[in-house]
Image (tube, grey):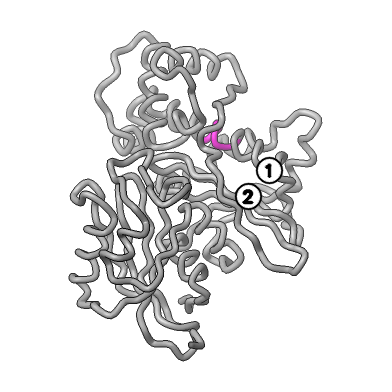
Amino acid sequence: MNPIHDTTPRLLGDIGGTNARFALVQGDGSPITQEVTLPTGQFPDLAAAAQTYLQSVGQTDVRQACIAIANPIDGDVLKMTNNHWQFSIEATRQQLGLDSLLMLNDWEAMAMAAPALKGSDLEQIGSGEPVPDAPKGLIGPGTGLGVSSLVRSRRGDWVPIAGEGGHVSLSPTCEREADILRILWRTYPHVSAERAISGMGLENLYRAICELNGTDAEPLAAAQVTERALAAKDTACEEALDRMCRLLGNAAANLAVTLGAHGGIYIGGGVIGRLGDYFAQSGFRAAFEAKGRFENYMKRIPTYVIRAEQPALIGCAMGLGVQPARG
């Protein structure tokens, strides 16, 4: 059936370590509608959360679904890294009565959405101009650290590449960051990038900085660290947030030089979305460009904050062959 004329609703989902976001889309040119966010901790698995959503919006005839999830897609059984959910994709399809269930890595879905983002969807940070058809990189801190990329095929199609770049080793760029890394090593034999560049990472940075400063760390959640930092009420919180932005800049630069991402680096994730104007004034871009002999190379690569609402859901719609209408 031609998706332009197909009015059958399709289920879209974006599953993170904390929240499960669901929505519906019909054919090409239809907007994404009925977005609902549910806390993953209240459900045993994807099927239970999706059933609750579908019942809440009164939909019983959904036959296709595309779900983005913060996890590698490796075989039929998924066990989430930052969540208690574990489930079979095929069993979930059957439980929901679907004809098809497409599972994507959440940042694979973000990559699929990238070509559709424009105008107010993106806020450019720093200099640089995108090279048409050049590779694009995507990275962003949420519960964990998501990373993906997008490249053109010889046929001209954009091809998303899912990966687990958030689990590469954290690389310090100065003595202070090296000291923080030494503290984190006591807890984590392998300190991945997301141990410092994410919600949990912000908490880890705060505690490590308090130890280095010789002060007692309070039991602060990431949102509290952010709130205190933005209000300039706690020097350890302020440094933790600034340090995370700088470490993100370095991680984004590593992705850019590895990929040759002259199409730009796109920054997403819930953590950055809550920083408002702070991020543009942070040390992110300076850290991104600080590549020694490659400084001029980095200056030519643009970096963008994704400001679009629910970009992973846009990517899921496109994964089902649907180009959703945008406001």
As rendered, which of 24 and 153 lies closer to the eye?
A: 153
Crowding around mark 2 (Cα neighbors within 10 Å: few <14, some 14 to 19, many 20+) is many
- SS at mark 1? helix
Q: Is residue 317 magenta?
A: no
Residue at image point 48% right, 17% down: 180
Q: Nearer the viewer, residue 15 or 61?
A: 61
Left/right placement of residue 253 relative to residue 133 reads left
Amino acid on which disc 1 is placed? Ala
Residues rendered magenta in the picture:
245-249
Q: Position of residue 134 (x, y in %)?
A: 74, 57
The residue that disc 2 covers is: 137
Q: Quadrant of residue 219?
A: top left
Secondary structure beneath dot 2 equals strand
Q: Residue at x 65, y 47 (%)?
A: 126
Vertical side of 160 occupied by 241: above or below? above
**Residue placed under numbered mark 1 in the picture:** 256
In the picture provided, is 52 more to the left or to the right than 83? left
Q: Is residue 144 visible?
A: yes
What's the CA distance linking mark 2 and mark 1? 7 Å
Q: Residue at x 48, y 87 (%)?
A: 1
Relative to residue 38, is residue 269 depicted above or below?
above
Contact (Cβ within 8 Å) of mark 2 with mark 1: yes
Give the label on residue 131, or none.
none
- Tell me where residue 181 appears, x and y as whole percent: 50, 17
**Residue 172 spot, x, y in % from top left:** 58, 22
The amino acid on which the numbered mark 2 sits, given as a three-letter code, is Gly
- Name the magenta segment's main secondary structure: helix
Q: Is residue 95 left or right of residue 167?
A: left
